[in-house]
Image (cartoon, rainbow, N blue to C red):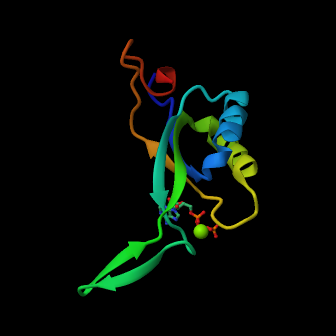
């Protein structure tokens, strides 16, 4: 159905928080997510180094990246749940980004947008 908008939530979290965040998200009705092991840096953990005139970022820290597509009406609740579950209060707790999704399709049926979830 057109106009049944969906959002993409990209979140980085500390790896040891993955299971707790997954449980909290399934508890509020999230039905799918992508999980990737990544390395990254935020405001403290990376610094730059000059090597042969070019600047390189060093000291990448392992993180888990979550990509979650949900109906737009659920997005705030998903953000709040990740925020409260992944938070330790120490540096490096992660980031959450929310993006509009132009289209989602369920391959098996051809359903689109929120019906595709
Ligand atoms: N501006 C950004 N763009 C894309 N990814 C980012 C950005 N900032 C941080 N990240 C990702 O989030 C991860 C965690 O970053 P982190 O939580 O350390 O951010 P921070 O801004 O340094 O905040 P904090 O003060 O809590 O450490 C990084 O490893 C990286 O993967
Ligand atoms: Mg940081």
Instruction: Write the residue at 67% across / 29% down.
Output: 26
Image quarter for ligand 1 equals: bottom right
- Residue 21 x/y as whole percent: 68, 40
Residue lying at the far left of the rendered structure: 52
At 63% across and 64% down in the image, what residue appears?
92
Q: Position of residue 45 (x, y in %)?
A: 55, 72
| Quadrant in the picture for residue 103 | top left
Asked if residue 91 is positioned above or below residue 21 in the image, the reply reads: below
Residue 51 at x, y percent in the picture: 29, 83
Vertical placement of 30 versus 89: above or below? above
The number of numbered badges drawn on the structure is 0
**Residue at the image point whose x is 50% and y is 21% from the top:** 115
Where is residue 57 shown, x and y percent of the image? 40, 74
Q: Is residue 30 left or right of residue 51?
A: right
User: Considering depth in this image, is 41 or 103 the residue closer to the camera?
Assistant: 41
Q: Which one is nearer the viewer's eye here, 28 or 53?
A: 53
| Image: 73 above or below 10 | above
């Amino acid at each position: 159905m057109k106009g049944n908008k969906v959002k993409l939530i990209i979140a980085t979290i500390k790896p040891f928080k993955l299971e707790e965040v997954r449980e909290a998200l399934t508890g509020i009705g999230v039905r799918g997510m992508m999980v990737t092991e990544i390395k990254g840096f935020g405001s403290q953990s990376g610094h730059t180094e000059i090597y042969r005139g070019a600047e390189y970022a060093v000291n990448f820290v392992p993180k888990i990246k979550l990509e979650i597509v949900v109906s737009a009406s659920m997005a705030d609740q998903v953000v709040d749940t990740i925020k409260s579950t992944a938070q330790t209060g120490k540096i490096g707790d992660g980031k959450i980004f929310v993006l509009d999704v132009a289209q989602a399709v369920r391959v098996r049926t051809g359903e689109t947008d929120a019906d595709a979830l």
